[in-house]
Amino acid sequence: MKLPLKVITPRGCAFEGDVDALYCPCAKGPIGILPGHAPFMSPVVEGATARIEKLGKSSSYRLGSGLLDVRGDGAYLLVSSFEETEGDAKIPE
């Protein structure tokens, strides 16, 4: 089972695909989103790093301000910017 993920910025769709997991720094702390996650909505931490796991590989992205919206049909990350970074993402605790 995969998690459909769509990342949208003011410039358009920055990422769309099925992923194994999303780890995102939210306003009340970091959260891991797996397939089948309950509906959830939260502001994300601007300037923090999110991690996407797909096919056994992990990619890190620096986030602009925005919102994470998890629904029955997938997860939507609506952010002002979304830039790939090098190395492993360090999710704040």
Image: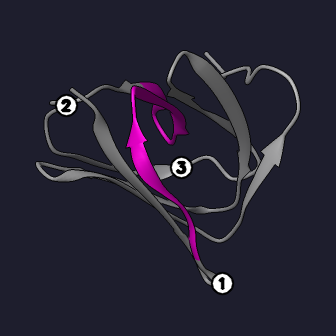
Q: Which residues are magenta?
A: 13-31
Circle on res. 11 = 1
Q: What type of secondary structure mainly makes up the magenta span?
A: strand
Q: Are marks 3 and 2 in contact (CB under 8 Å)?
A: no
Within 10 angstroms of label 3, few (less than 14), some, or many (20 or more) residues? many
Give the residue at the far bottom of this rendering. Answer: 11
Q: Is residue 79 left or right of residue 76?
A: right
User: Distance of mark 2 from mark 1, alpha carbons?
Assistant: 28 Å
Q: Which residue is mark 2?
A: 37
Please tell me which of labels 3 and 2 falls first in the chain.
2
Q: Quadrant of residue 40?
A: top left
Quadrant in the picture for the C terminus = top right
Please tell me which of labels 2 and 1 falls first in the chain.
1
Q: Is residue 43 above or below residue 89?
A: below
Within 10 angstroms of label 2, few (less than 14), some, or many (20 or more) residues? some
Question: 38 or 85, which lies in front?
Answer: 85
User: Distance of mark 3 from mark 2, alpha carbons?
Assistant: 17 Å
